[in-house]
Amino acid sequence: MKRFLRYTHYLLLAALVGCSSLAPILSTPTPAPATEATATSQPDPTQAVPTKASSPQTLRIWLPPEFDPSAETVSAGLLNQRLNSFGEKYPGLKIDIRIKGGNTDIVNFLSATNSAAPASMPDLIVLSYDQLQATAQTGILHPLDGLTDILQDPDWYVFARELSSIQNAAYGIPFAADALMTVYRPSVFELPPSDWESIIDSGTQMAFSASDPQQYFSLSLYLSGSSQFTDEQGAFMLDEDTLVRVLSYYQNAYEAMAFPLTVRDMETDVQSLNSYRTGEADLAVVWASSDIGVNSGAYTAIMGLDDAPHSIGDGWVWALAGSNADNQALAVELATYLVESEYMSEWTYASGYLPTRPLAFDGWEDDAVKDGIDDVLLSAHPVPSPDVIALSGPIMQEALVRIFNGDQAEVVARSVVESLK
């Protein structure tokens, strides 16, 4: 019944988005002998790839290392099978897989390739949310308007749609997500923790990465107060009242010894998760991808300042970057094939990432896990931009250290805001 009500909710949301849909424009390539998708080494962007009119149609795809279909993992095998299956539908189609990423700045690499060898640009590329924002601003990516109406389907989380759009224009088709969440011990909490006061008063302890310079947990709390990071002129700022509320939460929890003593030294969610797994803490704030592969406990969304669920998340989308207009429709068709709910269910379960479509949970085995992650995704919002994180993270971290050293929340917040003027 819970899933039925939620899906009804998704249908109503879709109806509100708009009744008109974009007409998909898809083309069918000329049949010829089939080939398999294979991963190849990275090309020199200064060397153009020669083409001939008689050559078979080639679809170039760039993937980050974590989504390499040739890796020896179950999820990689599933992706490779899916790519090969699509290739079988179009005999003669060559799917050229290139692995990009690691230490490579993919945005600058795309720009360099687009300038030096536009024929080598990928028809389809996987980009994270911040990469999508940065690349769309360069004008390299092609918007999806007029190519597909897939994002009008009701089977999407609102969070996923937000990941795919830049200034109200759709630039990506979301296929994997991650989100900040709370993992907790069911033997201690009969029901998911629903407010900060009860946690602080319960005598339990919560671990989080207090020394993380990016301060995702603090940013999630701050954003739950409906505050922004820029003023009317677009300059970076922090709202004093909201900052007081965030720091007051930390102060109250710290004074009640609701954090383990080691929390000050935790820089990553892996460390806070280890604190939970070893029994030092009964709750931990972690990224979902850090734990859903092993399922260390029960999951719920992070609570905001008003005790309403509020999480921040990230994700990856399929985007169009190629200069070959004839390949765009086929690239969109492949991306659509790679985000079908049934396939996404199997692939995300194997990969340890979160689905971007509610129906993709149907293939997951543990109902409690599904319900908990579903709540996380229903409350998720895209992570702030790298520029905002680079500015706000260290400020939040320094403020948190001062709270742990005994300073009062109001004093710390006032000095932080004054320093930004």
Image: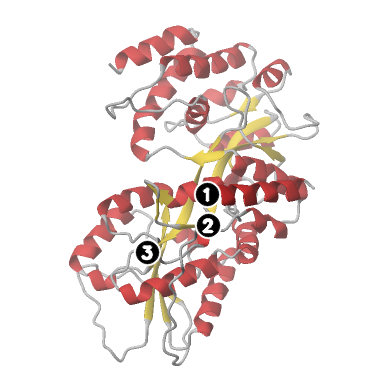
Query: In this figure, which residue is indicated by the disc labeled 2?
Result: 152
Q: How is the image coloured?
A: secondary structure
Q: Is residue 387 visible?
A: yes
Task: Tell me the SS state at disc 1.
Answer: helix
Query: In this figure, which residue is indicated by the disc labeled 3?
Result: 320
For disc 3, the neighbor class at 10 Å (few under 14, some 14 to 19, many from 20) is many
Please, what is the three-letter code of the amino acid marked with disc 1?
Val
Q: Are marks 3 and 1 in contact (CB under 8 Å)?
A: no
| x, y percent for residue 206 | 64, 26
- Looking at the image, is mark 2 or mark 1 earlier in the sequence? 1
Distance (Cα) linking label 3 and label 1:
23 Å
Taking 371 as reference, is 400 left or right? left
Distance (Cα) linking label 2 and label 3:
18 Å
- Looking at the image, is mark 2 or mark 3 earlier in the sequence? 2
- Looking at the image, is mark 3 or mark 1 earlier in the sequence? 1
Taking 321 as reference, is 248 left or right? right
| x, y percent for residue 136 | 32, 53
| x, y percent for residue 10 | 63, 49
Number of marks in picture: 3
Q: Nearer the viewer, mark 2 or mark 3?
A: 2
Please, what is the three-letter code of the amino acid marked with disc 2?
Gln
Query: In this figure, which residue is indicated by the disc labeled 1?
Result: 17
Quarter-of-image position of residue 357? bottom right
Q: Is residue 45 above or below residue 105?
A: below
Taking 91 as reference, is 362 left or right? right
